[in-house]
Amino acid sequence: MLMSLFIFPAKASEMPVRAMDEMPMVSQVLVRKEERRLYLMSGEEIVRSYRIGLGDNPTGHKLFEGDERTPEGKYTLDWRNPESDFYKSIHVSYPNHQDRELAQAWGLDPGGSIMIHGLPNDAGEWAFAFVGLDWTDGCIAVSNEEMDEIWQLVSDGTPIHILP
């Protein structure tokens, strides 16, 4: 069932609407960079889907701080910041051991502070302009309303799998 997601991904408008109190537990977050989609999964079932913005240079795995790429691989959502510069944010456990080794082999710093987050706090009336654009420094951006929902549904310690 999960493999069909990779071939024919669901769009948010195609998903059944559920009340928040009827939501199954989110067991994994799945990001498909090429599709610009973030999926909340309960087992193999997609329970929510969001349009995302990525780094300014989204193709390929993050190699070093400042490359503006979003990492690819398996990580954990390990802590959250309710007072982020980007509304609210949940931290992705990048870099892992392999990421550090790769950057070190090139004599570079792998960076860090990769987050799922909302819009800049100073976006104001221009918030609409961020939708559908790759504008972050390597993070995964959603609207503030979507961030509120993700914040509520995803627990610290939830695995996140970021695919090309």
Image (tube, rainbow, N blue to C red):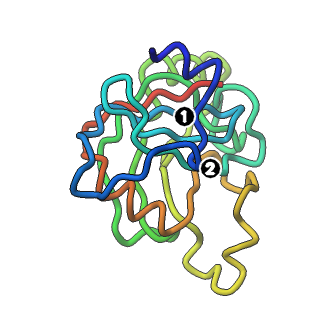
Q: Quadrant of residue 48?
A: top left
Residue 38 horizontal/vertical position (percent): 53, 41
Marker count (numbered): 2
Question: Eyeballing the image, is 60 above or below 152?
Answer: above
Is residue 97 toward the left or the right of residue 142 in the image? left
Judge the density around disc 2: few (<14), some (14-19), many (≥20) Cα neighbours within 10 Å.
Answer: many
Q: Nearer the viewer, residue 151 or 8?
A: 8
Residue 148 horizontal/vertical position (percent): 39, 65
Q: Check disc 1 and report its element: helix, strand or loop.
A: strand
Residue 7 horizontal/vertical position (percent): 64, 18
Q: Nearer the viewer, residue 9 or 91?
A: 9
Question: Eyeballing the image, is 9 above or below 153?
Answer: above
Quadrant of the image containing the N terminus? top left
Hey, what amino acid is under mark 2?
A: Ile
Residue lying at 50% horizontally and 43% vertically, measured from the top left: 15
Pointer 2: what residue? Answer: 52
Residue 118 horizontal/vertical position (percent): 52, 64
Q: Quadrant of residue 31?
A: top right
Q: Check disc 2 and report its element: helix, strand or loop.
A: loop
Q: Nearer the viewer, residue 19 or 140?
A: 19
Q: Are marks 1 and 2 in contact (CB under 8 Å)?
A: yes
Hey, what amino acid is under mark 1?
A: Val
Residue lying at 38% horizontally and 60% vertically, measured from the top left: 149
Question: Eyeballing the image, is 112 above or below 118?
Answer: above
Q: Earlier in the sequence, mark 1 or mark 2?
A: 1
Residue lying at 61% horizontally and 31% vertically, measured from the top left: 32
Judge the density around disc 1: few (<14), some (14-19), many (≥20) Cα neighbours within 10 Å.
Answer: many
Q: CA distance from mark 1 to mark 2?
A: 9 Å
Is residue 99 toward the left or the right of residue 29 in the image? right
Q: Of the numbered discs in the image, which one, if any, rests on residue 118?
A: none
Q: Of the numbered discs in the image, which one, if any, rests on residue 31?
A: 1
Residue lying at 66% horizontally and 25% vertically, measured from the top left: 164
